[in-house]
């Protein structure tokens, strides 16, 4: 028998360490998430002993993102998305702009070139899908008005990052000082092509998927085979997400989200959500393990002042910007605090953007390390941010 089994080793090692340290964290009255991230650090390449495969772990984590966004889409209709567009679209765009400018300001202070500052700032501007949705579910806010605003905000952020990932290579030469920027005509063509692909995918899901997927589920239910039904749900979530990425160059998360929204049209959508829940939870844990694997603990010691500034931008700068924006739309203080707390972290899109910046020569290894360390610290602080938001919201309610 072959003994070189990196896939099995990564899954088993990640889940076993996550279970042990998650249980320990819970015993110490800490969120299990702290244990999952610590497990990732222990099985990562920067610590001695057992090491998981650093190439496979992010792909396994992506499955968790797909299944999680698919489940959210099942509780989120087109009508819900349209209902929050007036606050989610301008709010997300303004918050991305503020966080990017803060990141560029810090990079300018450090003497980095403008191109690196732009990539660094953009990476600090987008919240983690997994962290936000898990927190909303734990607090029972996912299907509330506040939760729908947060999810709509998240969808807009993901769309902006999809466009950024397409446009960044076109501007890489100009940002690094190597060649001239593309003309307005070239830029317009790239942007129009990207938006056309997104529109084509959404139209396909609304016109074809909206009829086919509920019909397919109904046919499977009539067979009476539960195993086949579960397989059909998973095949739909993963197949649509993969097809959206390969054919339309849309992120896995957005593809899965729209697949879930379409499946919500079926009367069996709640059963589908229940069937996918165990795998969704398991792969979400692997996501946090994979995040922990990216952290080099030396960064926490060598670059502490700059790391603190980075975390402040993520936790305080983004939160204050989001709070002010939501208040401008005349929403309650409680709603503003919840939205601000939910966005006070960064995650998977930040890692993707940092990796692209490294490959294009726009981001240094130091910048990438600060983004990764800032993400982990902000994820660890996120439960505390939610607790503070709830406490302050209760005070506002008492005064009222």
Image: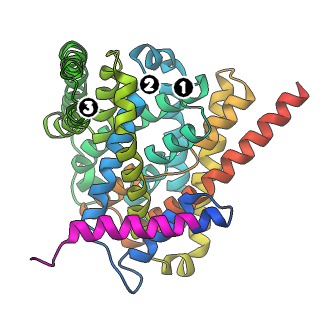
Looking at the image, residue 33 lies above or below residue 324: below
Q: Residue 232 carries which label?
A: none
Using a 10 Å C-alpha cutoff, classify the residue at mark 2 as few (fewer than 14 neighbours), some (14 to 19) or many (20 or more). Answer: some
Circle 1: element type: loop
Q: Do the residues labelled 1 and 2 touch (CB within 8 Å)?
A: yes
Q: In which quadrant will I find the C terminus? A: top right
Residue 110 in sight from this viewpoint: no
Q: Is residue 274 within the magenta segment? A: no
The nearer-to-camera label among 2 and 3 is 3
Q: Name the residue under label 1.
A: 143
Chief secondary structure of the magenta span?
helix
Q: Do the residues labelled 3 and 1 touch (CB within 8 Å)?
A: no
Q: Which mark is residue 75?
A: 2
Looking at the image, residue 181 lies above or below residue 37: above
Q: What residue span does the magenta drawing correspond to? A: 1-23
CA distance separating discs 3 and 1: 27 Å
Taking the spot 23% from the left edge, 36% from the top edge, the residue there is 227
């Amino acid at each position: 028998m072959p003994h070189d089994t990196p896939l099995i080793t990564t899954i088993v090692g990640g889940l076993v360490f996550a279970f042990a340290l998650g249980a320990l964290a819970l015993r110490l009255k800490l969120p299990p998430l702290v244990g999952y991230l610590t497990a990732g650090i222990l099985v990562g390449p920067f610590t001695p002993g057992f090491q998981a495969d650093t190439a496979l772990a992010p792909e396994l984590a992506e499955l968790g993102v797909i299944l999680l966004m698919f489940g959210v889409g099942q509780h989120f209709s087109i009508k819900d998305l349209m209902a929050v567009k007036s606050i989610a679209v301008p709010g997300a765009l303004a918050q991305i702009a503020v966080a990017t400018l803060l990141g560029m300001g810090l990079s300018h202070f450090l003497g980095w070139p403008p191109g690196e500052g732009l990539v660094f700032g953009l990476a600090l501007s987008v919240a983690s899908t997994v962290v936000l949705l898990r927190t909303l579910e734990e607090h029972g806010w996912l299907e509330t008005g506040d939760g729908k605003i947060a999810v709509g905000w998240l969808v807009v952020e993901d769309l902006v990052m999809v466009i950024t990932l397409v446009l960044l290579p076109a501007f890489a030469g100009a940002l690094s000082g190597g060649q001239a920027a593309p003309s307005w005509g070239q830029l317009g063509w790239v942007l129009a092509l990207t938006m056309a692909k997104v529109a084509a995918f959404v139209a396909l899901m609304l016109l074809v998927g909206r009829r086919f997927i509920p019909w397919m589920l109904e046919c499977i239910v009539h067979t009476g085979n539960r195993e086949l039904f579960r397989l059909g749900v998973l095949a739909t979530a993963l197949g649509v997400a993969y097809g959206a990425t390969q054919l339309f160059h849309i992120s896995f998360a957005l593809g899965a989200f729209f697949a879930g929204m379409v499946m919500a049209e079926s009367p069996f959508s709640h059963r589908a959500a229940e069937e996918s829940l165990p795998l969704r939870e398991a792969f979400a844990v692997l996501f946090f393990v994979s995040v922990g694997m990216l952290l080099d603990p030396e960064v926490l010691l060598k670059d502490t002042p700059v790391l603190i500034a980075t975390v402040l931008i993520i936790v305080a700068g983004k939160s204050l910007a989001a709070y002010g924006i939501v208040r401008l739309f005349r929403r309650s203080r409680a709603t503003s605090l919840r939205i601000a707390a939910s966005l006070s972290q960064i995650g998977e899109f930040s890692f993707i953007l940092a990796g692209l910046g490294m490959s294009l020569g726009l981001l240094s290894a130091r910048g990438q390390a600060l983004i990764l360390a800032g993400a982990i610290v902000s994820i660890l602080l996120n439960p505390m941010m939610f607790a503070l938001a709830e406490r302050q919201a209760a005070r506002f309610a008492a005064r009222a």
